[in-house]
Image (cartoon, rainbow, N blue to C red):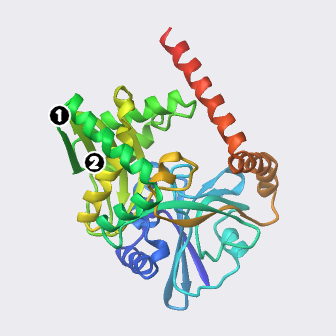
Amino acid sequence: MRVSIVHPRDLAESDIERWRTLQGADPAFDSPFLSPEFTITVGDLQDQVRVAVLQDGQDTVGFFPYERHPMGIGKPVAAGLTDAQGLVHAKDLEFDPQRLIKSCGLGVFEFDHLVAGQPLLTSRHTLHPSPIIDLRDGYDSYIETIKLTSGKTYRSTAYKSRKLQRDVGPLQHDYAVTDSATLRTLLGWKTGQYRRTGRTDRFARPWIVELVERLLATDTEHFGGVLDMLYVDGRPVAGHFGLRTATTLAGWFPAYDTSFAKYSPGLIHHLAMAEKAAKAGIEVIDMGRGEKEYKEKLKNGEYEVAEGQVARPSAGAGVHWMLRVPVRKARGTVLANPVLRSTADRALKTFGRLRTSLQSS
């Protein structure tokens, strides 16, 4: 096994085609976050992105996209933003994970959404559910399932949709919008949500805004950005920007206008989005790992993703363990306990209200 390290921009067209072939050969890799286009676009904006190209004899058998940070600490591409991570590889590939990260110049590789079946996985890694909307049997079949599993939510959402139209006006849903002004509206809502809930505003980092703008302008057979928006009486009320392969849409940035919150516009929008996505050939909407109430209400299936690290003896791995592992374990304890999770969520929202009040005073 030979491992070559390249910057994404230096991948040959034959490499990109081989990557797509390997990705298409295994349903586990059917995520836009594992597509070569995503890594190449992020690499244009973040110079620490690299790709390890694995070769066995004359055959290219794998692509491992990653970021190399100081002290040999490795992370997935666009760490903190992606819901699918890992190596795109040939079936039954076997190798030593520690040798791989050594070849990458890493002492440790940290992940939180590693897809199932990875050669990087061991029994030590923690698996988490990642809810999906499975549309492989069609939208109508999905709705019938939701009526059984989340009947109260479905009836309430249908009622609120009718009430919104009575109170304000007719609904319109536009799928695969390319207008940059519409994107800015959505990102503005999302920034407000981050601030209200005490989270870090991702769009305060200019490179992430540029990344989203570039991905919105990307539309190929294999990969593209998808922006859709729900309107009432011509006014935008909820929307979403995500990425797609030919058959999977990755949920990424959903948001809504809070002045319509009593109508649950996010749920109305998600059902409308699922219907349009199914008509566009999407078979799975991956909503991503996370204990969000709306995901539990809308899901009719789930994947599994892993959290953990692969490390070899090194100074960087030791520093990483001291700084990150205790924090990750504490976070895992909180997320696994509904009471602790709810308490932490309330604390973050309180912080968000205080921060917003101070910023506006």
Q: Earlier in the sequence, mark 2 or mark 1?
A: 2
Q: Position of residue 24 (x, y in %)?
A: 40, 78
Q: Position of residue 7 (x, y in %)?
A: 49, 62
Q: Are marks 2 and 1 in contact (CB under 8 Å)?
A: no
What is the three-letter code of the residue carrying label 2? Asp
Image point (55%, 91%), residue name: 57
**Residue at the bottom extreme, as displayed:** 57
Judge left or right: residue 241 versus residue 117: left
**Camera-nearest label, 2 or 1:** 1
Binning the other alpha carbons within 10 Å of mark 1 as few (below 14), some (14 to 19) or many (20 upward) gives few
Q: Secondary structure at mark 2?
A: strand
Q: Quadrant of residue 298?
A: bottom left
Q: Quadrant of residue 160?
A: top left
Relative vertical location of residue 358 with respect to residue 125 in this rendering, above or below: above
Image point (17%, 37%), residue name: 170
Q: Which residue lies under the disc numbered 2?
A: 228
**Residue at the top extreme, as displayed:** 361
What is the three-letter code of the residue carrying label 1? Gly
Residue 40, visible in the rendered structure = no
Distance between the alpha carbons at the discs numbered 2 and 1: 14 Å
Residue 234, visible in the rendered structure = yes
Q: Secondary structure at mark 1?
A: loop
Q: Tag on residue 234?
A: 1
Q: Tag on residue 98?
A: none
